Image (cartoon, rainbow, N blue to C red):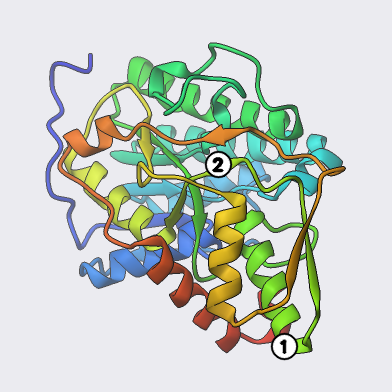
Amino acid sequence: MSDDLAFVPSRLDRHAPFYVAGHRGLAGSAVVRRLASEGFDRIVTRSSSELDLTERQDVFRFFREQRPRYVVLAAAKVGGILANSTYPVDFLSVNLRIQANVMDAAAETGVERLVFLGSSCIYPKLAAQPLREDSLLTGHLEPTNDAYAIAKIAGILHAQSVRRQYGLPWISVMPTNLYGPNDNFSPLGSHVLPALIRRYDEAAASGSAVVTNWGSGNPRREFMHVDDLASSIVHLMEHYDGASHVNVGTGRDLTIREVAEMIAELVGYRGETRWDTSQPDGTPQKLLDISLLRSTGWTPGIGLRGGLARTIAWYRRTDAELRVA
């Protein structure tokens, strides 16, 4: 089946089994919340202790037993610059195995619609901004997370290959930097925004006079609340069918310095911020071109300041052990 023949996106069956892989993570938990709010009543989830997605036989057995009609593949090993730089083998190997196992099992059991979640780090370090979908594989990757990026690129090609070989209308989405409930706030594993929230909140509570952040603060980043991502995923499953992956973002970016100032204000920190320029900045800018996403009729609804305030409130309500695990 070619892309221009048979399948026409339509409303998802709210009573069909819908498997969310990685339901306890930042993106997966948001997808579960979204599905529940829209009336899906057969949401299938498994914790990593119940189903190890790197174990191929177990994954195939699970799909044969559960027979999900829809799948969102949000399970992945993720982390910030430090974690990616320190453990590149883990980020490559674990993610390749998760993706291959889930997509192979889903193809064998005829999963109708699957969404693979990638990352904006798939694009070349120095690609023209904003990043278009066709910028993929046009230059060198950012070396601090190239292993993770290669795994995600392989996942995109896997979904595209299923379309070509089996005619299943699977798609991939490439989210920008996400934040929100159930993020990872640990010192080693967190991305930049939750790391900043934790750092400034602790400094405000302790009365620290100085907060020191990595890098120069000059790189520009785009941030999206994870509930917007979840909304876009359901929308795309019902309105988009194409071989190209789809960028999902807000279309606006700020410098890390500007974001840090916003977080400091929101948590009530009044001390000094310093920047350790001996530490790496990473990619100079990552702003997604979301023209394809907008053409499907979807736009983001949560502004950064409001989304940060909600995330900080969640972080403060959450048990200390859980929120930095």
Helix, strand or loop under label 1: helix
Give the residue pinned by disc 2: 220
* Disc number for residue 85: none
* Label 1 packing within 10 angstroms: few (<14), some (14-19), many (20+): few
Residue at screen point 35% across, 15% down: 164
* Label 2 packing within 10 angstroms: few (<14), some (14-19), many (20+): some
Location of residue 256 in the rendering, given as x and y in whole percent from the top left corner: 60, 51
Residue at screen point 56% across, 50% down: 75
**Relative vertical location of residue 56 with respect to residue 38 in this rendering, above or below:** above
Quarter location, residue 100: top right
Q: Amino acid at mark 1?
A: Ala
Tell me the quadrant of the picture where the N terminus can be found.
Answer: top left
Seen as rendered, the residue at the extreme top is: 138
Q: Nearer the viewer, residue 271 or 306?
A: 271
Location of residue 59 in the rendering, given as x and y in whole percent from the top left corner: 57, 47
**Relative vertical location of residue 192 with respect to residue 287 in this rendering, above or below:** below
Tell me the quadrant of the picture where the C terminus can be found.
Answer: bottom right
Q: Nearer the viewer, residue 255 or 91?
A: 255
The earlier-in-sequence mark between 1 and 2 is: 1
Helix, strand or loop under label 2: strand
Give the residue pinned by disc 1: 205
Quarter location, residue 280: top right
- Spatial CA distance of label 1 from label 2 is 28 Å
In this rendering, position of residue 240 left or right of residue 181: left
Q: Amino acid at mark 2?
A: Arg
In this rendering, position of residue 142 left or right of residue 220: right
Location of residue 275 in the rendering, given as x and y in whole percent from the top left corner: 78, 54
